Image (cartoon, helix red, strand yellow):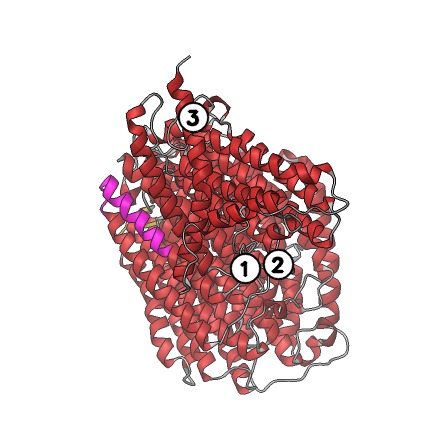
Amino acid sequence: MIVTAQAINFIAALLLLVAFAMLSQRRIRALVNLFAVQGVLLTASTLLTASGTGQTHLYYSAALTLILKVFVLPLILHRLVRRLQLTGDVEMLINTATTMLVGIVLVIVAFNLALPISEFAGTITRGTLGIALACVLLAFLMMITRRKAVAQVIGFLSMENGLFFAATSITYGMPMVVELGIGLDVLVGTFVFGVFFFRIRETFDSLDIHHLERLRER
Amino acid sequence: MSELAFLLGIPLLGAAALAFRGSQYRAPEMNAILSGLTFLAACALTVRIISIGPRTAMNELFFVDAFNVFLVTLTAFIGFTTALFGTPYMRVERDRGKVGAGAMRLYHSMYQLFTFTMLLALTTNNMGILWVALEGATLATVLLVSLYRTPASLEAAWKYFILCGVGIAQALFGTILLYLAASRAGGTGGEALLWTHLNAAKGQLEPSVVAIAFVFLLVGYGTKVGLAPLHNWLPDAHAEGPTPISAVLSGLLLNVALYAVIRCKVLADGALGTHLAGNLMMGFGLLTVVLSAFFLGRQTDIKRLFAYSSIEHMGFITFAFGMGGAIANFAGLLHMTVHSLTKSAIFFAAGHAAQKAGTQNIDDIRGLVHMSPAVGWGLMIGTLAILGLPPFGVFAAEFMILTTAMREHAWATPFLLVALAVAFAAVFGKVQTMVFGDPSVRPLPHRPAALPVFVHLVIVLILGLYIPAHLAAWYREAASMIG
Amino acid sequence: MPILPFASQFLETLLAVLAAPLLIGWVNQCRAWLQNRSAPGLLQPYRVIRKLFRKESVLAQNASPLFRLTPYVVFGSMILAVSIVPLVATGLPLSPVADVIALVGLLAFARVFMALAAMDVGTAFGSLGARREMLVAALAEPALLMVFFMPSLIAQSTSLTTIVETLAHRPFALYPSLAFAAVAFVMVLLAENARIPIDNPATHLELTMIHEAMILEYSGRHLALMEWAHALKLVIYFTIGIALFLPWGIAEAGNWIAIPLAIVALAVKLAVGGAALAVLESVSVKLRIFRAPEFLATAFLLAVLGMLTHVLLGAGT
């Protein structure tokens, strides 16, 4: 039990590392790969939680995570990147060092927010809630600091990853029917994003979202 | 309850059918008929619930009580009338070459899917499914907002998608925390997230966790309600999408998102035993009202103008539910009803007006009443109604909210009154020049669908003059449920 | 006064000082293998040092006494540093001073002298090297301190001896924070020891060199001491890394029988570490000097993250 908890903590730390790596990554393809790595880590931690606690429904959600977040979504994203020929670096609005510093502040915020909640939770993995929240906030930061639409979408998806991790860590996952629904939404969402990219591309000839800044509050 | 199966089954199957047949010439009528059938199912369900009281169905997966059945009926009704309005409207758009066959198929299919997600969100008993349904509603409408594929519409849809996506992620975290609180209070497995179970055990939920959960839920679902400061997506999405979509966004989506907030508030109130949830809602509501009132005067686009008006009204309603108590809740429910009806009627009229003028720019629309009296008067009466002039229903609702506010939260009334006055001046001036003045619009080959406009307005008028006894009883029951 | 602890302390220090050039030779050997070159031989650093000691030391006309003093100061502080790091055993006479913060100070002390001496003669290269060295150091030092704090937090002490005792001699536990710290430490090690990707020890290309530029004016026995001190510094970093992250095998206080085993363990760990360093250097490219802050900021970030995970996840429970 203790070894399981330690292993999960270790994976959580790696998740945080991946979140920071995503924040500093400039290349779209590498970003997609990092997203897939995040999926692998999530699957591993879910499996460990499942075996450590005997919550059988977590095996299903681990399988769902593996299929959806390690194979299907990265595959779709890679296809999109290839079809849209998105190579080269992503412009960032703020330089990396500043982003990282803001990231650290966010992590501290997340830890403080998580502390009272995780004390209340009775799971063996409750300590990882702070990291899950930090992943959510970091993904949010990534959405803010990137100019390319695809990077924003990856940020969106990794935010969902963070929430999934939060659910696993404090309540051993959501009820199955809800998890299925969320998975469906994420999948459909990615397809919609895909359709959307092509529309943006054919209208603007670029996926840079600064084209999307004309509507302002007047 | 077979009515429930029909209610949810018709739009779902309709979406599938229209995904294949949605580009046919008669597809708009098919869409309207499907929506009409859904409305009939909703009526049947209402009649059943009134006679047998609140019920759960299908292994407690669905739950219908006085509160949500009233919204189900309203949703199905506006869905039906909007489909009626959309029949000639979308045909004109197609004849003008603004949308192609594929876009028509997408539009009709997604229209039904959107109706389905709305009804699912209203009738589900599971807080998780509620989240899934609301996210599904965004997904169903986001491609419709960018239906015309203009740069502005793409931007609007992107903003809508991203902002609502981020917002709804907050709500998911709130739901997770709710589940945590419930599972620690003795709930087991999938049942812990069922609203009926949560409601029964709300006294045992850990207050600190529920408080944090409610903040996340309020911010998350509040984004969809259009509460400031996360309201930015709303005017864009309303202005750039096809008008029927603007009408259902204002008339349905905002209501359903607010419904989700209120369901959460009931739980938070029960668990906390304080007025924290209500105070938060009042704060956000007031901020929204004031902010949007001042933005109203700066709008140059007719649909954006009314979108901001929607934000203002949602703020007002949120404020009302935040105050709580029998009268304020009653007024809030009434306001939800009349706002949906009036606002969708206005969007119908505004859509026809924009179609006739060939632009949504307020300065370029002139003399509607001369070329098309139905559209012109529809817009004028609708505007008067939405601005809260007697004898319309909006007046009755706002009057009740204001008097309650004066009695219980006197400090807030000046803000509300000033906001109302500013909104009145801004909107009335703009609409008056559009309706009267020298004509700049031309007649269209299709007759405008004036029927939905006037049906809505007549209902709003009736609700302002006299609320039928069993309707009032029904509101009262729902209001007492909200607490 | 027991003679055994002092003898072993002396022997340990002597061993480290004498073996230091061997480590450099081993790293060069591995690099040569990896790059398909024929290596100069494991003992080449010894030959270089011997040759330099025999040669006359040439001083610039305007060199101050500081310039002449510096090699001895640097070499001396390196010897002191290497003797307080627990190499093969804990509980030696100098163990009470083995404080990680003191260690960082000691290294900084040597560095300041080196930078001053480099600027002393007033050549362009010397000042350039010193400036760059201070830039790297200013960024590397906080990262190094953060790295040290993590094991210190776990062991509740900044004494290296206590840290080694705590980590090596208690039930195995996974510390995510230590993993972060280890990665950050490796990055600092690369920067501080003038290794690729921050500096290239094998080149005198004026645009890129840092360490070599600083010692460019030295010759003869002074240069020999500087080179030796540099080799010692690498040993110090390696042994600190071993003490913090791989302390298994270091003999407990008073357990003299375990010492031969500990020496073998140390040799194996140094050999593996040296090979790993060679691999790391061979697969990475030298960064432009302007990217160095980014590299070190990443190290700092990792260290901070490790700290945060430590605070949140606790001591692996």
Which of pointers 3 and 2 lies earlier in the amino acid sequence?
3
- Subunit under mark 3: C
Instruction: Specify the quadrant of the image occupied by residue B12.
Output: bottom left
In 3D space, how far apart are the residues under numbered discs 3 and 2 (Cα atoms)? Answer: 40 Å
- Subunit under mark 1: C
Q: In this view, does A209 lie above or below A120?
A: below
- The residue type indicated by label 2 comes to Thr
The x, y position of residue B112, in whole percent, is 40, 69
Q: Circle 3 sits in a helix, a strand or a loop, which is it?
A: helix
Disc marking residue C9: 3
The x, y position of residue C201, in whole percent, is 54, 54
Instruction: Look at 49% across and 45% down and name the residue there.
Output: C184
Instruction: Look at 68% across and 46% down and name the residue there.
Output: C118
Q: In which quarter of the image is the N terminus of chain C?
A: top left
On whether residue A44 falls in the magenta region, the answer is yes
Q: Please provide the residue range marked out in magenta.
A: A39-56
The x, y position of residue C87, in whole percent, is 41, 33
Q: Is residue B295 visible?
A: yes
Q: In this view, does B372 lie above or below C315?
A: below
Mark 2 vs mark 1: in front: 2
Q: Callout 2: 10 Å neighbours few (<14), some, many (20+)?
A: some
Left or right, B110 with reference to B398 = left
